[in-house]
Amino acid sequence: MTDTALANPPTIVPFLKFGADGAPYLEGQQCADCGEIYTTERMACSKCFSRKPFKAVRLPTTGELYTFSIVHRSYPGIKVPFVSATVDLDGACSLKGTLIEVEPDPNHVKTGMKVEVVFRELEHKNKEGRTYVSYFFRPRQA
Amino acid sequence: MSEDVYVLGVDMIKFGRFPHRTIDGLGAEAALLALDDAGLGIKDMQALYLGNVGHVTQFVGQKILQQIGQTGIPVVNCTNACASGATAFREAYLAVKSGEFDLVLAVGVEQMGKGLLGNAGGGDDGIPREGLLGSRLMPALFAEVGIEHSRKYGTKPEHFAKVSVKNHHHSTLNPKAMYQIETPLEEVMGAEMIAYPNTKLMCSVNVDGSAAAVIASAKKARELGMGRAVRVRASALTSDRFTQRDLTLPDFNTCTRDAAKIAYEKAGIGPQDINLVELHDCFATAEIVHYENLGLCGEGEAGAFIDSGATWLGGKVPVNVSGGLLSKGHPLGATGIANIYEVATHLRGEAGARQVEGARLGLTHVLGLGQACAVHVLEKV
């Protein structure tokens, strides 16, 4: 086990990675032929069927809110309301996530609004007592 | 070219909650109703196609035969999410169309609990993804599709809510619907918010239910009598081809458009020829987008279309006169065949108080999240 592996906290999705400096980022898999970007691994490109090896790319941290819903009823134990968001990352793929730091109200959440990707520690810890990290969206700060 | 295929018998049980019954008992009841409707028995059936989601690994089709007659015929248990029943119907249709069989039975059945459908997405770490990575629950997914329509065309929450007003009204005329209760617009919009813009009255009802159909070759239909037969003019089934956001937000639109295009081409007709539609109103937002996906109105016109009353009973093209999934109820595996029952009943002129007058051509549509979209066109003989 390397020092880096020890230093990096557990994540909620496998495509959340940490740079050499320990800073989190999201990693996409880009098709070598058509350039389509995915957040999960696959045998061939869903779009153009190319079997060439995918290239790991850093996903941008800025994007636009494509569509959303404000969830008021969910499973027991899930805090509501929250904003379920589908975001188009600038020049990359779209990504599902939760939009935070905004009133969960249709008067405040608007399609087309500029958002950014942020990383937050969760309340959850793994067996070693280490805190999980996930990504969220928030309205883009000026 | 192969010969036409006919529905000779079709029926459904009244949808409801039957926690103390067995899945095979529910399915068997619809199977016998459909056989009775056709004036046939299980001994006449050459194959059984079964649609189900929740119990599909339990040989539901075979268990139904154990209840109504073990003839040793081939049984295929189909699962395709909310399109499972329609998939079973289509497999039955294809088996007859191919010339392999002359008489087959398709059954759809589901026994469901109450509550939200979807996946909380907990991994090995036991942490639910729901709420952390947005929502994967059905109300939110279909709400996002509605908001996408609002973004493109300015569709308002009222437009979506009007779908529920209409379908709940229609269900008051359908004794086999789970509910027969009027829900005025204020009540729909004022109901508990589940996933904006879908309130509780804009979400389909989880119920238990079953439906079945007897499908026959032209030769057999002529032999047995065409009196109440309904012709299957087209059957189409699609999955989700690649589109820009499908892997992030399931694209319910493209697979529906693809299936509708195939079905209209196979039937040699256009949407303007259709007299009634049973479409997949799992949420009120879904019905609005499917007006355009099925070509019932132009792009961006769905809001004005519901406002115009065109999709009410008595309108230009009545949609979900059964009450739809919103009020008739949505037992996943049964829904696709229950839709066939509804349209066939109108084509036979037997729909009573909710009869669409002069109906000659009807369309059914279901959509399984994943995605599977089935469209059938039925014609009065």
Image: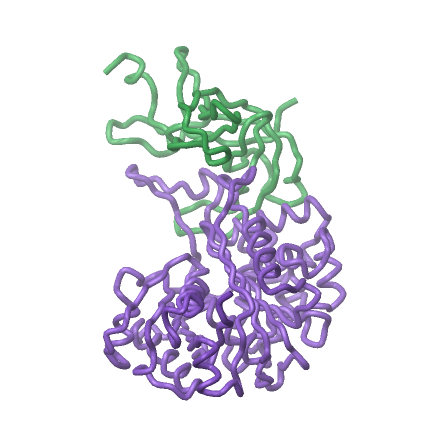
Q: Where residue B46 sits: x, y (%)?
A: 32, 75
Q: Quadrant of the C terminus of chain B?
A: bottom right
The colour applied to the residues of chain B in this rendering is purple
Q: How many marks?
A: 0
Residue depicted at 62% across the width and 32% down the height: A64
Tell me if residue B135 comes above or below residue B229 in the rendering. Answer: above
In the rendered view, does A131 fall on the left or right side of B216? left
The chosen color scheme is by chain
Q: Where residue A130 sits: x, y (%)?
A: 30, 26
Give the camera-side residue of B167 and B47: B47
Whether residue A31 appears in this view of the structure is: yes
In the rendered view, does B202 fall on the left or right side of B5? right
Give the camera-side residue of B193 and B145: B145
Tell me if residue B77 comes above or below residue B173 in the rendering. Answer: above
Residue depicted at 50% across the width and 80% down the height: B176
Which image quadrant is residue B358 in? bottom right
Whether residue B85 appears in this view of the structure is: no
Q: Which chain is green?
A: A
Residue depicted at 27% across the width and 76% down the height: B65
Q: Where residue B289 sits: x, y (%)?
A: 63, 55
Query: Which residue is the extreme one toward the front?
Result: B1
Which image quadrant is residue A67 in? top right
Give the camera-side residue of B197 and B269: B269
Give the camera-side residue of A14 and B34: B34
